[in-house]
Image (cartoon, rainbow, N blue to C red):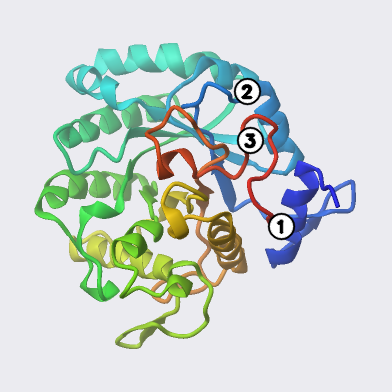
Amino acid sequence: MFYSTKKLFLFFFLCIVLIVNYNNNGFVTAVNSIGLNYGLLGDNLPSPSNVINLYKSIDITKIRIFDPNTEVLNALRGHRDIAVTVGVRDQDLAALAASEEAVKGWFATNIEPYLPDVNIAFITVGNEVIPGPIGSQVLPVMQSLTNLVRSRNLPISISTVVAMWNLEQSYPPSAGMFTSQAREQLVPVLKLLSQTNTPILVNIYPYFPYVSDPASIPLDYATFNTEAIVVQDGPLGYSNMFDSIFDAFVWAMEKEGVKDLPMVVSETGWPSAGNGNFTTPDIAGTYNRNFVKHITSGKGTPKKPNKGIDVFLFATFNENQKPAGTEQNFGLYNPNDMKPIYKLF
């Protein structure tokens, strides 16, 4: 039987959402803790206006773009029910870190024109550049942007996006600690975020540790497909790897004196092709389906129980201009026909 893209996505949420609302068509849709990453590294992608229509049709209210793309931001005009996270490009960090005037100019060019009719909720300074050679440029740009939005009383949060490799140790979760370079570059950022009560955005991919050691890590543990406790960490029991990584990051922050800082999961997902039997549509669908079920249950993680987590799935489309292999195959949809890559229910 043929199902439209909208019905596939809505039936997906019908199966997994604990807290529900009914739209005008009588379909069950998800609470808005789930967002989507909207990448643009493809030569066959649908127009931004069509993509925005897709988001509206499946009740997505949060998206993340990786740079202030004018075509996308113009397509978002008038859709203030969609909260947008906009990234500062890594290659712009050096110039912006060197000059507060440059930051003001960047904001005037890339953000200011859209403030009246686009809901820009976050600006992220750099994508996974901490720790690294340009990681030290993140903090001064964040400080300048924070001062700017505060001086104008704008409801825009300023943060950065970091990856799992900031963790020198993550097993068991309570042993979580940052690398020495992460301590140098990330901890000052975390302390700034604590002062402004702004979340840190973290990319968490159980796929990568799983494929690096599939003999030791059960696939069901990596894909939320078991309720059995696989890792016992003192009084805390873990039945999935995502919670383990998330809590390891929390433990690492606490060891640096940063407590109760919110975390947004800016990326997670599983590729549907590109690495043999590790990356099939069935496994990718299992991960994403179970992940959303876990998030929308509201049960949190063992260290942070009964606390909601804001997340962004990666990504909306397969992108054919990314490096060949798995990088091209994290999408939920084919770009040519905007149909789901695998069944979502």
In the picture of the structure, the residue carrying the numbered disc 3 is 82
In the picture of the structure, the residue carrying the numbered disc 2 is 48
Question: Is residue 79 among the parts visible in the rendering?
Answer: no
Relative to residue 86, is residue 245 depicted above or below? below
Is disc 1 placed on a helix, strand or loop? helix
Q: Amino acid at mark 1?
A: Phe
Check contact, mark 1 vs mark 2: CB within 8 A.
Answer: no
Who comes first in sequence, dot 1 or dot 3?
A: 1
- Residue at 51% from the left image edge and 70% from the top image edge: 224
Is disc 2 placed on a helix, strand or loop? helix
Which is more foreground, mark 1 or mark 3?
Answer: 1
Q: Residue 101 at x, y = what percent?
A: 27, 13
Check contact, mark 3 vs mark 2: CB within 8 A.
Answer: no
Residue at the extreme right = 25
CA separation in Å, label 3 and label 2: 14 Å
Q: Which mark is residue 12?
A: 1
Question: Is residue 241 among the parts visible in the rendering?
Answer: yes
Q: Amino acid at mark 2?
A: Pro
CA separation in Å, label 1 and label 3: 21 Å
Q: Residue 24 at x, y = what percent?
A: 89, 46
Q: Residue 88 at x, y = what percent?
A: 36, 26
